[in-house]
Amino acid sequence: MGLRPGQDPLDHYMHVITEKTGSLIATSGRFGAMFSGAPDEVAELIADACLRIGVAWQLSDDVLDVASTSLQSGKEPGTDLRQGVRTLPVLYALRADDGSAETGRLRSLLSDADLTDPALHAEALALLRTSPALEEARETVRSWISGARALVTRLPEVPARAAFESLCDFVITRTG
């Protein structure tokens, strides 16, 4: 699923996440609902909510890769950045152009630098952590969860609904 000529990298990234992580979680939700004997309309509602939760979960991982410490996440911060993976915060930072020196430097590092170099990696990570792109990525996570929550509220008042609501809360809490 490579980037097509002229395709916006952000649109491509969101398409990939929706078709991979989102659809995987949606299918799991749909099958769970079907195997529990839920009516078709409930299974469809759960699948739609799960798609949004799955996308939000992946995007929250993108945020955590930038914003968390090793103690919080259990992994080295900026792993995706070091590997050249253009996650949501990076894509937002690359399209930002507020004219500030920090934004310009960050864009330069993300576009041209060898981020396997520890000093350049640390600089890019520090700039990304204070960039508006990180908050924009968090807001995107909240938006996907808001969409999921709106669907979940349409489910019958059963324990599964409470579990979905808790999952939505957890994704927001883990993202910061």
Image (cartoon, rainbow, N blue to C red):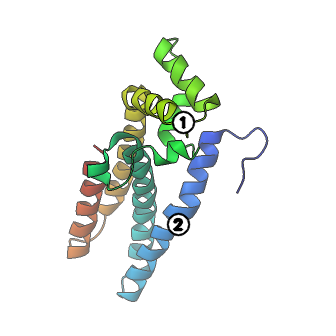
Q: Is residue 126 above or below residue 59?
A: above
Seen from the viewer's position, the closer of residues 156 and 18 is 18
Q: Position of residue 127 (x, y in %)?
A: 43, 26
Amino acid at dot 1: Asp
Residue 10 shows in this picture: yes
Q: Is residue 97 above or below residue 70?
A: above
**Residue at the front extreme of this rendering:** 118
Which quarter of the figure has residue 128? Answer: top left
Contact flag, marks 1 and 2 (Cβ < 8 Å): no
Quadrant into which the C terminus falls: top left
Q: How many marks?
A: 2
Judge whether 137 appears above or below 112 on screen. below
Q: Which residue is mark 2?
A: 23
Front-lying residue, 146 or 167: 167
Q: Could you tell whether 109 is left or right of 176 in the image?
A: right
Among the two numbered marks 1 and 2 on one chain, the one whose residue lies closer to the N terminus: 2
What residue do we see at 37% from left, 38% from top?
A: 139
Which of labels 1 and 2 is toward the front?
Answer: 1
Query: Who's the residue at 44% across and 81% down the image?
Result: 31
Q: Residue at x 44, y 76 (%)?
A: 28
Identify the disc placed on residue 117.
1
Examine the rendering and report whether any part of residue 158 can be seen: no
Q: Quadrant of the N terminus?
A: bottom right
Q: In the image, residue 153 lies at what x, y percent?
A: 28, 60
Q: Residues within 10 Å of mark 1 (few under 14, many from 20)?
A: few
Residue 162 placed where, x, y %? 21, 67
Seen from the viewer's position, the closer of residues 104 and 99 is 104
**Marks 1 and 2, Cα distance to the nearest angstrom?**
36 Å
Residue type highlighted by circle 2: Ser
Q: In the image, 88: left or right of 158? A: right
The numbered dot on residue 71 is: none
Where residue 145 sits in the image (x, y, percent)? 35, 52
